[in-house]
Image (cartoon, rainbow, N blue to C red):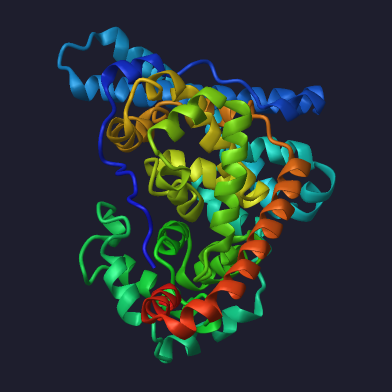
């Protein structure tokens, strides 16, 4: 099963576009207005930490890129790092408390927890927090993992072929005999054995690869099983990919409603939504953004599900509408590959902020789901009426039927 061409995270955008989207002052998302003064103060501290991290990385890039740095810039960088270390210590204590008192935070401090996750889960806490978010800490399937690895899967050849293409530039996955490729193969093979209907689908390896960067393979396997079961991913990766069709249908509605001019332009250029958005849904932006940005989106996905993919996708189109309207189909394809992936490298917070400015109506999405199901059901009925007549008399009809099944 193949995916549409995916954007390369290694290409750089035009400098002019980068400057136009350079890091702003990042603000909390809309839910924060319901929080207490203490909770708002905590969020403000996290914002300050993000700002200092940003300033620190900029000053480091500046020092590495130029030999003409004055002493004062080194002092200010050192001062920022000192402030940052205090804030990092506070954050460490806070997330340690959250992990230890998880049930209480889920029950009593849900709004604050949601805001904190939108600000980004600290790297060292991602493994445990992701497991807690999807309730993957005590799964019976974990005990089957070592036995599954002793079995053979009909998907092994496919998995082996794709593994070399999964994060090829990442140190953990570099080289045919790397530990990363070995454990990625193990998890993908084990899943193909517990869910034979889905087996293996190209694209899912990027999600598993990200999990393996954070946790051991048994834990990554459990989290992936839970994501497939509870987060609509199994429906996305089924051979029919019917859920992907639904997501594209829902996204097109949002595009038509919120960016009608851009939607008209896309149509005039035959630039179909599936051409740029399929990989967003199938790999949760892991093949679009560099990992630091994609992981922030994934943090939110772990708590809020696929809604964040719709939000981020539409936010990207809103930000780039003016530029996209000037381009033809080929120009837009290049723009999606070269410019869009790096616009938020310096401030992922801005991407999150823009995503939560997008209008998203769960009731409307549910209505569209029913509409899409009815439309597909009608199409199936029409095909059943047509197929016996075509298949019985026409060798062409029979070959197309076989091609469809393959």
- Pick the residue in front: 144 or 277: 277
Residue 290, x across and y down, in percent: 37, 41
Q: Determine the residue located farthest toward the left in the rendered image.
A: 67
Using the image as rendered, state which of residue 169 and residue 13 is in the foreground. Answer: 13
- Whether 25 is drawn above or below 138: the answer is above
Give the residue at x 46% y 58%: 207
> What residue is at 43 percent from the left and 18 percent from the top?
322
Q: Please provide percent x and percent y for residue 44.
A: 64, 22
Which residue is at 61% across, 80% downward?
141
In the image, residue 137 lies at what x, y percent? 64, 67
Q: Quadrant of residue 181?
A: bottom left
In depth, the one of 273 and 203 nearer the eye is: 273
Position of the N terminus, as image quadrant, is bottom left
- In the displayed structure, would residue 99 be above or below residue 221? above
Q: Is any atom of residue 241 visible in this view?
A: yes
Left/right placement of residue 77 relative to residue 360 reads left
Which quadrant does the C terminus fall into?
bottom left
Residue 112, quarter of the rendered image? top right
Q: Is residue 246 above or below residue 15?
A: below
Residue 61 image offset from top left, x and y in percent: 27, 24
Tell me what residue is drawn at x 27 percent, y 71 percent. Answer: 161
Residue 92 is at least partly visible in this image: no
Q: Nearer the viewer, residue 9 or 44?
A: 9
In the image, residue 192 above or below residue 201: below
């Amino acid at each position: 099963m193949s995916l549409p061409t995916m954007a390369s995270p290694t290409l750089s955008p035009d400098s002019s576009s980068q400057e136009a989207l350079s890091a702003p002052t990042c603000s909390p998302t809309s839910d924060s207005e319901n929080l207490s003064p203490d909770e708002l103060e905590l969020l403000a501290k996290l914002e300050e930490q993000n700002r200092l991290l940003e300033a620190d990385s900029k000053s480091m890039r500046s020092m590495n890129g130029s030999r003409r740095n004055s002493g004062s810039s080194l002092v200010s960088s050192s001062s920022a790092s000192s402030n940052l270390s205090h804030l990092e210590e506070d954050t460490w204590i806070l997330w340690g408390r959250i992990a230890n008192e998880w049930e209480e935070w889920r029950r009593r401090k849900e709004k604050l927890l949601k805001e904190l996750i939108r600000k980004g889960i600290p790297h060292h806490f991602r493994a445990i927090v992701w497991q807690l978010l999807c309730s993957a800490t005590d799964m019976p399937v974990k005990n089957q993992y070592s036995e599954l690895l002793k079995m053979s899967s009909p998907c092994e050849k496919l998995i082996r072929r794709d593994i070399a293409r999964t994060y090829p530039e990442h140190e953990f996955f570099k080289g045919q005999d790397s530990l990363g490729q070995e454990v990625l193969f193990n998890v993908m093979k084990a899943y193909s054995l517990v869910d034979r209907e889905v087996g293996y689908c190209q694209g899912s390896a990027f999600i598993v690869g990200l999990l393996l960067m954070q946790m051991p393979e048994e834990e990554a396997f459990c989290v992936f099983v839970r994501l497939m079961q509870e987060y609509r991913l199994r429906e996305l990766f089924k051979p029919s990919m019917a859920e992907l069709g639904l997501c594209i249908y829902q996204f097109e509605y949002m595009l038509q409603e919120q960016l009608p001019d851009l939607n008209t332009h896309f149509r005039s250029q035959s630039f179909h939504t599936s051409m740029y958005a399929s990989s967003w849904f199938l790999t949760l932006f892991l093949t679009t953004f560099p990992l630091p940005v994609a992981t922030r989106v994934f943090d939110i996905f772990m708590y809020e599900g696929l809604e964040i993919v719709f939000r981020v996708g539409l936010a990207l189109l809103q930000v780039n509408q003016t530029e996209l309207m000037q381009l033809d189909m080929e120009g837009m394809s290049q723009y999606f590959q070269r410019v869009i992936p790096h616009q938020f490298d310096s401030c992922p917070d801005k991407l999150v902020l823009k995503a939560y400015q997008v209008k998203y109506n769960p009731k409307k999405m549910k209505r569209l789901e029913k509409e899409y199901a009815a439309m597909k059901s009608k199409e199936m009925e029409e095909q059943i009426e047509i197929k016996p007549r075509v298949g019985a008399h026409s060798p062409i009809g029979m070959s197309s039927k076989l091609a469809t099944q393959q």
